[in-house]
Amino acid sequence: METIGRTIYYRVATGKEQLQYRYYISSASISAEQFASTVRAHWGIENRLNWVPDVTMREDDCPISRGHAADSLACFRHVALNQIRSEKTIKASVNRKQKMATMSEEVLDLIVNA
């Protein structure tokens, strides 16, 4: 163990303040600037990979955990998300396209055939 670091996470959401301390241990000997950059990069990747499925497909709210069912559903969600993102003729967010597909067979067809 070479480096121990602490970050302070602060945000205001819906009128409530939130303050968290996050601690990190590293085997690399790095400066404070390198530590900050590494932590930002880590959370940037985390947010890009997990935020959209968590928010638009409510992945964290899924109670299914039996056998490989959770992994299988995550795979289906990932495929659906890729299809929604591949459809370029409709200029809308992933969440909006998903809602549109539930109300219109034409939109669903566009997404499935993208």
Image (tube, rainbow, N blue to C red):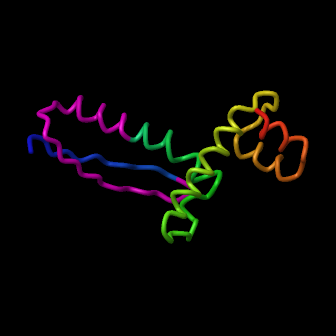
Q: Of all residues shown, which one is farthest toward the front? A: 67
Q: Of all residues shown, which one is farthest toward the left? A: 2
- Image coordinates of residue 97 in percent, x first then y, are 77, 42
Q: Is residue 13 above or below residue 109?
A: below
Q: Is residue 103 above or below residue 93?
A: below
Q: Is residue 36 magenta?
A: yes
Residue shown at 85% from the left, 41% from the top: 109
Which picture quadrant has residue 3?
top left
- Image coordinates of residue 57 in percent, x first then y, are 64, 54
Quadrant containing the C terminus in the rendered view: top right
Q: Give the number of marks.
A: 0
Which picture quadrant has residue 60?
bottom right
Residue shown at 28% from the left, 46% from the top: 7
Quadrant containing the N terminus in the rendered view: top left
- Image coordinates of residue 8 in percent, x first then y, are 31, 48
Q: Is residue 46 magenta?
A: no
| Residue stretch rendered in magenta on the structure | 13-42
Q: Is residue 54 above or below residue 85?
A: below
Q: Give the side of residue 89 with respect to residue 11, left or right.
A: right
Q: Give the side of residue 62 with respect to residue 39, left or right.
A: right
Q: Is residue 16 above or below residue 40?
A: below
Front residue (pair 39, 52): 52
Front residue (pair 46, 4): 46
Residue shown at 56% from the left, 54% from the top: 74
- Image coordinates of residue 33 in percent, x first then y, are 23, 29
Front residue (pair 29, 7): 29
Residue shown at 38% from the left, 56% from the top: 19
Front residue (pair 15, 27): 27
Q: Give the side of residue 87 with respect to residue 53, left or right.
A: right
Q: Give the side of residue 12 with respect to residue 102, left or right.
A: left
